[in-house]
Amino acid sequence: IDFDVVIRNGTVATASDVFAADVGIAGGKVVALGTGLALGRKEIDATGRLVLPGGVDSHCHIEEPAVGQVHNADTFASGTASAAAGGTTTVISFSQQVKGEGITQQLADYHIKAEQALIDYSFHIVISDPSPEVMAALPALIEQGHRSIKIFLTYDSVVLDDEQTLNVLALARQEGALVTVHAENHSAIKFLTNALEKAGLTLPKHHAWAKPMVVEREACHRVIALAELLDVPIQIFHVSGAEAAEEIRRAQNRGLKIFGETCPQYLMLTAEDLNRPNFEGAKFLCSPAPRTRADQEALWDYIRTGVLGIVSSDHAPNRFDDVHGKKVRGTDAPFSAIPNGVPGLATRLPILFSEGVGKGRIDLQTFVAITSTNPAKLFGIHPQKGTIAIGADADIAIWDPNKTVTIRNELLHHQVDYTVYEGVEVTGWPEITLSRGKVVVENGEIRGKPGDGRFLARGPYDAIKPLGRHVTPFDPVSGTLIDN
Ligand code: URP
Ligand code: ZN
Ligand code: ZN
Ligand code: ZN
């Protein structure tokens, strides 16, 4: 074979295996794994390096409409450059429905924006208003390869009630799409926020008081019950601690197809970070709120046992100050006026590698699984993405497992003006990232170009098939009696 690229003398790791091999790449795909491969037109020496599947970040907010003045500093060009700088080669971001508007044009607009991506991408469709018109438009969009829907159980601008949730779940089962859920109890949060504001308790740290674990645990339990009622698999986004994860574990133990995701911020931050001085706590404000040290360790346990199969970034590129240095959040904004979410596309893998593999909490294969293989499987892009195997896209990150880096915002290539990991030391860093065999990032320099990324249309796939298990002798989704 004629190789475009050979990655030589490295240690390849997948979700199941770790082995010494050269990787031969042609036509953007892995075409050979072995020792002593013939010369490639480009040779990359990976001696002493790990050769890993590029990360798949199945939860990141890129180029969404502004919330106030600050939301979404990243474009598809900057967001995907940042992802690649951190060893990620696929992003699944959101097509956000504006309440009262349709979804088809919005999605078309996101497709145009995403043409500036440096790496491959796909979309979850956010449904904030499941009107009859929107529900009628969805099947065609799912058929075109948008096989996942995000719903929110909180935030005024996007919240669905239980009946709307059931309608979306039913449609997803019929059309073959996965529903992913932001699970927090909206009414409870509103009540608590009002009460806190009346008492004058509006600092960033009070965000965690307005969103205690019980509001997340309740919403997880409720949406799992609704999914069970209709026999629909779901994924719960950004599980922040033990009690919410426990709801998922219980559902899984009962055989239900309930999938759970967490994010590095819930493994690294606690509610204490919201109380940093000089309004710095506002930088750490995300939903669900960061919890406790005990929750962090519980989340690692749930990762090890497979209950939480995916760790994504939930990259939310809210700047702290605007591009002119103006304090758009003020220095005393009430927590309810501060946009939620932290940036994290570039730091997701280095943090997980260092804190997970480096500190012995997970092995290398589990690292690959939770950051690449599992999200690729759950969202229907495996084995094209998420592994190093013959025929897979040559989306590869070459890591120096021993390189120690102090995280600085300047290293991250995003357009956010801060990182919650400023000054954190990590060991292990992706030095070279390839997307379909082409170098996108090399030693911190962006080599890829806007437009190199392609849309990943996702076909029907097994992970999201219903169980065929019904609560009553009547299946309310198909409207038929079950004979058994
Ligand atoms: O606080 C968060 N997570 N913001 C991003 C949007 C979301 O809810 O995922
Ligand atoms: Zn969310
Ligand atoms: Zn999110
Ligand atoms: Zn400005």
Image: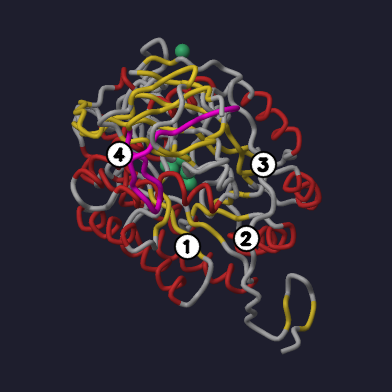
Name the residue tied to disc 3: 99
**Vertical relation: 138 (above or below) 49:** below
Residue 393 image offset from top left, x and y in percent: 55, 36
Name the amino acid, label 4. Pro
Disc 2 to disc 4, C-alpha distance: 43 Å
Q: Which stretch did the figure color magenta?
A: 10-27
Left or right: 247, with 386 as reference point: left
Is the residue marked 2 within 8 Å of ligand 3, measured from its CB? no
**Residue 204 location, quadrant:** top left
Name the amino acid, label 3. Lys
Residue 321 image offset from top left, x and y in percent: 37, 19
Q: Residue at x 37, y 63 (%)?
A: 245
Q: Nearer the viewer, residue 134 or 123?
A: 123
Name the amino acid, label 1. Ala
Name the residue tied to disc 2: 462
| Rendered-image quarter of ligand 1 | top left
Q: Are marks 2 and 1 in contact (CB under 8 Å)?
A: no
Q: Earlier in the sequence, mark 4 or mark 3?
A: 3
Front tag of 4 and 1: 1
Whether residue 111 is in magenta: the answer is no
Name the residue tied to disc 1: 219
Name the residue tied to disc 4: 204
Disc 2 to disc 1, C-alpha distance: 26 Å
Q: Earlier in the sequence, mark 1 or mark 3?
A: 3
